[in-house]
Image (tube, rainbow, N blue to C red):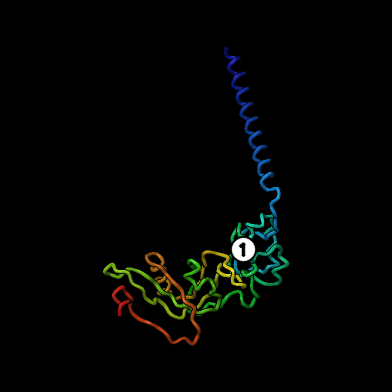
Amino acid sequence: MFKNRVIAVVVAALLAVAGAILVFIYASNAEQRALEGVELRPVLVVTEFVPAGTVAADLGTSVAVQELPALSVAEGTVSSVEQLGDRVASADLLPGEQVFDARFVAADDSDASVPEGTQQLSFSLPTQRAVGGTVQSGDLVGVFVSIATAEGLPSTQLLLDGVQVLRVQGGMSDDGAEVTETVTVTLAVTAEQARSIVYSLEYGSVWLTEQPEDLDDTVSGELTREGLAQ
């Protein structure tokens, strides 16, 4: 009786292994059948973290060419490191991302210098809240915040004016095509300004405006619902 049980257990285990193998083979064949007739395109994909400022020629094994279905290859991507020339990454590149031509700039334009007495603060916003994703390194921006007043009423105000942009990750490509839904912006701010922005991000909604250097247009105070009628 014991011997029969052992044989039954062994047979069951073998059947389970055989079933798993058959399922794997079926899934592999199904994947192959699904890819038949699908147009593939080569695209450069990030395999290891690439910090901003990295020269294209030094990407090495941090990127690799992959064959992906044409429909999943984003507009504005490149298929080889050679297409990037001697430019440098204008923002950090994360593993799994496709490499966009617009994220590489001339070495002299890769990063705005950090003004003395300021520190760097990065945060992400939906593209439409960062001038449609067109903000670039070296730009000046206004920081607006919508947040509740002390009485709990919704309000909007200009939080900061003339803040320098140091780096931008994501946004719009050079031809105006949207390549990301969010934009990560790095600003040069004082500790007090950083505190104000972080608070606004945590408890309100932040919008950026792009400002020319000679702009003379500011506004003070909070705008509430009552103020809209005035």
Question: Considering the image in quadrants, where does the C terminus appear?
Answer: bottom left
Give residue 152's quadrant in the image. Answer: bottom left
Task: Tell me where residue 215 appears, x and y as whole percent.
Answer: 46, 86
Task: Tell me where residue 182 appears, x and y as whole percent.
Answer: 51, 65
Q: Seen from this angle, which residue lies furthest front?
A: 37
Figure disc tally: 1
Q: Seen from this angle, which residue lies furthest top?
A: 1
Q: Counting other residues with Cα less than 10 Å from the Cα at mark 1, is it few (<14), some (14-19), or many (20 or more)?
A: some
Residue 37 vs residue 194, the one in the foreground: 37
Horizontally, is 36 left or right of 131 in the view? right
Horizontally, is 132 left or right of 45 in the view? left
Amino acid type, label 1: Val
Task: Tell me where residue 93 appears, x and y as whole percent.
Answer: 60, 63
Above or below, 14 relative to 169: above
Give residue 60's quadrant in the image. Answer: bottom right
Give residue 58's quadrant in the image. Answer: bottom right
Q: Residue at x 66, y 33 (%)?
A: 22
Q: Residue at x 55, y 72 (%)?
A: 167
Residue 147 vs residue 69, the one in the foreground: 69
**Secondary structure at numbered mark 1:** loop
Q: According to the image, label 1 marks what residue?
A: 50
Q: Seen from this angle, which residue lies furthest right?
A: 82
Q: Residue at x 59, y 22 (%)?
A: 9
Question: Considering the image in quadrants, where does the N terminus appear?
Answer: top right
